[in-house]
Image (cartoon, rainbow, N blue to C red):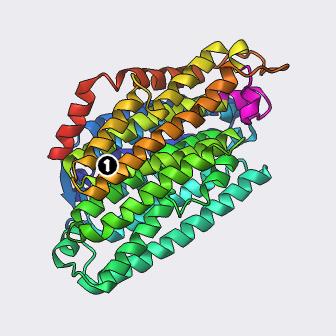
Amino acid sequence: MNYSQFLNMIPEATLVAVLLIVFFADLFSSKDSERRWLNPLVCALLALQIVPCALAEPASAFAGMYVATAAANVMKVILTAGTLIVLIMSRSWLNDSRAARNEGEFYALICSTLLGMYMMMSSGHFLLFFLGLEMASVPMACLVAMDKWKKISAEAGAKYVLMAVFSSGVMLFGLSYIYGSTGTLYFEDVANALPLSPVTILGLVFFFAGMGFKLSLVPFHFWTADTYQGAPTPVTGYLSVISKGAAAFALCTIFVHVFGSMVHQWEGLLYITIVLSITVGNLFAMRQSELKRFMAFSSISQAGYIMLAVVGNSAAGLTALMYYTLIYVVANMAVFTVISAVEENNQGKTEIDDYNGFYQTNPRLSFLMTLALFSLAGIPPFAGMFSKFFVFMAAAEHGSVWAYAVVFIALLNTVVSLYYYLLIVKAMYIKKSDSPLPYFRSNCNTRLALALCTVGIALFGIGSCIYEWLSQSASL
């Protein structure tokens, strides 16, 4: 084996180095006082990890099994930055829970899942893609069940494991049909040899079903609410944005580059799942009384909006997907950072009614929560409005009647989403409570995470250079 090919995998190689440093730092930290430096160490290493991802050139290795495009490298920058925010906001949870004794394991698992997402997005072969997917999914199940002394967390972990097992099995079943029809698993070779037959269509359907579970698209979404509610809040935030962004990017590239000749077959699947995901997610979000379950159905709806970018089947669609993911990361993580801060300072309260009168005692957190919710709803002038605009434009560029119909339904659902996001705002500002949540002062990590997210919400929408940078990478 020519080991020099690893030099073409700079982002993955540096992330493996980060993982090893974290592992040995935790291994040789015998006292709790020594482990308090783990969080700053991991955050500094991940901040430095952004550099090789941003500077990496398009490359391939191992006979084309690994193919890193400019767009994939940019997506790695976005997901690494999002993971950094997760680690910053998780410090207070680790300090205030029994999970503190497993702090090193938490960081190692986070880095392992991120490495799997890197491999998944840079794969040129279905085997490497599947290995990356499992590398991201298996440690995620451990993260979901991190609060193992809580019954609800153990239940969430069990449901996530079952979901991962069944979705992987369904996906492999579909890939076996693809391999049987083409005799290869290389993306480029499959695209050139893919026949239009019932067997390949069935393989495509099963593959899409397996990815639908990962993205929590309707009708593959039933695990989402229970898992989001039971998992620790930092893990829920990580699962909702980072994992979903990587899966959406991988699915988009595979649809366009591998199954491009079957576009008329997978477009129908995509239209149906987009409409169902956006509509069902919105309708069920309105029925929730628990905030993490509320955000779970919100994320199902957001997954539908992300998939709108795939409809365009163009560089503009890929650019819109990356831009939407970037905005979704900062907006959603701002919401989960506030939820985590409230939960840790108020005996685990996560009911929406608990936020009644929240503005009276915690006006700053209420204001930042409102900014994030407005961005998720797509209200101008926040960045979320621009992200929705670009995915709508990418889908409309397709030019078909069905694409226009899907965009129109998505626009109507945007109004519905505004209603249920305003339910939270109404609870914080309008509803009165005899005993509102008491005032508390957030720690430095929470304030830093919220500052980063708020800056992103305010500036990413008006900073045209961000979109141009993403557009340039998608067109290369």
Answer with the quarter of the image where residue 325 lies.
top left
Question: Between residues 355 and 100, which one lies in front from this camera angle?
Answer: 355
Answer with the quarter of the image where residue 202 lies.
bottom left
Q: Is residue 219 above or below residue 341?
A: below
Going by the image, does 246 lie left or right of 68?
right
Going by the image, does 179 lie left or right of 97?
left
Q: Is residue 204 above or below residue 59?
A: below
Going by the image, does 381 lie left or right of 312?
right
Picture coordinates of residue 21 (x, y %)?
Answer: 47, 42
Q: Is residue 292 above or below residue 209?
A: above
Residue type at the position of mark 1: Ala
Question: Between residues 362 and 29, which one lies in front from this camera angle?
Answer: 362
Picture coordinates of residue 206 (x, y %)?
Answer: 42, 74
- What segment is highlighted magenta in the picture? 341-357
Picture coordinates of residue 144 (x, y %)?
Answer: 63, 51
> SS at mark 1?
helix
Going by the image, does 149 lie left or right of 104?
right
Q: In the image, what residue occupies the spot 46% across and 23% down?
A: 452
Q: In the image, what residue occupies the spot 38% across and 53% down?
A: 248
Query: Is residue 447 one of those drawn in magenta?
Result: no
* Residue designated by label 1: 309
Q: Residues within 10 Å of mark 1 (few under 14, many from 20)?
A: many
